[in-house]
Image (cartoon, rainbow, N blue to C red):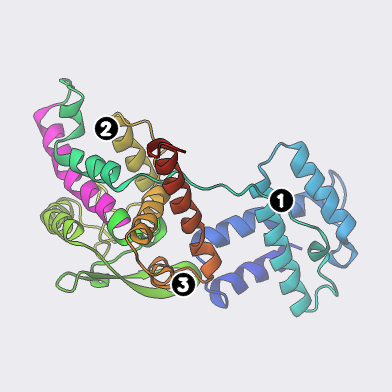
Amino acid sequence: MNDAIDQFIGYLQYEKNASPCTIREYRRDVSQFLGFLTPPGEKTMALYKVDHKIIREFVSLLYDQNLERSSIARKLAALRTFFKFCMREGLTKQNPARLVSSPKLPKRVPRVLSAEEMNSFLDNLASPPSRRTGSKKQSQKEREKEKLLLKRDRAILELLYGAGVRVSELVGLDVMNIDVHGQMIRVLGKGRKERIVPYGEKAKQAIENYWPVRDEILARSPGPDHEAVFLNGAGRRLTTDSVRYLVKKYARLSNVNWDLHPHALRHAFATHLLADGADLRAIQELLGHVSLSTTQRYTQATVEQLMAVYDKSHPHA
């Protein structure tokens, strides 16, 4: 089974061109199933003996552990893909995970920030966070470093909203991927599919302000990630977790009661385009969605916002 998992991960990496995040999650999910098939002190159940009843027992265990339905659905999807690969390789004759239904997921329409809210939030980044909160404990050197990194963070936030890129796509950007004059970036999306995305004037200005900061970071801490666009203070490529942290940090420092995360800025990008009359197919291309149905979620968000305005404003609502 361990060999089968290693072969499966190689298939995801070299044939399916799956993202590192997908590979990491699939390995974790399939390894968890392996643990389920290996009771303490006993040998692992052979793959060919696994049937849909075993898969259902595994799902029941996940429910008993109070996992979210979305997490259970993802683990089932990983097992379906794994057994499909095993069938292709002749390791098993069936895909038992296909006979187990995924849990029904609630249709959640994300709360999307209005254009006014988003502009106010981004414009509020004009001064360093420590000064807005009145901190007096920082040294002059620390304040200067924070002021420099604020320019980096402004560029990150402007690109997340102005180009609608995923956080993994943003941290994966290299300098060669940015066309400064054409205001375009080339990103590597899901399935390692490349696409070209434009960005606006505010993002352009933020990126131009960040370049000297980046040069200063590299001059102080040259390292192996010198091609990366967004670097931390030590000259290393920023991680997705770092970007999630800084988005939440600025939301907190701006005293806004939002559950803000990088994907919320991507939601806002799509919803605001749609509200201003952009074609759904064009938005699909910009977001890098394979299926139009994925993009259509933003239609529902826009309709709900319109209904909220109607209920609040119309005398007969």
The alpha-carbon separation of the residues under discs 1 and 3 comes to 29 Å
Marked residue nearer the N-terminal end (2 or 3): 3
Foreground label between 1 and 3? 1
The answer to whether 221 appears left or right of 238 in the picture is: left
**Residue 192 bears which disc, if any?**
3
Among the two numbered marks 2 and 1 on one chain, the one whose residue lies closer to the N terminus? 1
Q: Amino acid at mark 3?
A: Arg
As measured in the structure, the alpha-carbon distance from the residue carrying label 2 to the one carrying label 3 is: 35 Å
Task: Report the side of 78 relative to 83 (left or right).
Answer: left
Helix, strand or loop for disc 2: loop
Up-down relation of residue 291 to residue 141 (above or below)? below
| Three-letter code for the amino acid on which mark 2 is drawn | Ser
Amino acid at circle 1: Lys
Q: Which mark is residue 104?
A: 1
Question: Is 264 left or right of 118, judged from the image as shown?
Answer: right
Magenta stretch: includes residue 53: no
In the rendered image, residue 252, in percent from the top left (x then y), is placed at 32, 31
Q: In the image, what residue occupies the spot 51% across and 62% down? A: 296
Q: Residues within 10 Å of mark 2 (few under 14, many from 20)?
A: some
- Secondary element at image label 1: loop
Front residue of 312/219: it is 312
Q: Nearer the viewer, mark 2 or mark 1?
A: 1
Image coordinates for residue 194, horizontal then vertical, percent: 40, 75
Disc 2, disc 3: CB below 8 Å? no
Q: Which residues are magenta?
A: 139-160
The x and y percentages for residue 14 are 55, 76
Residue 56 drawn above or below residue 95: above
**Mark 3 Cα-neighbour bin, 10 Å: few <14, some 14–19, many ≥20:** some
Q: Magenta segment: does it hold 147?
A: yes
When asked about the image quadrant of residue 212, the answer is bottom left
Gap in angstroms between the C-alphas marked 2 and 1 = 37 Å
Residue 254 got which mark?
2
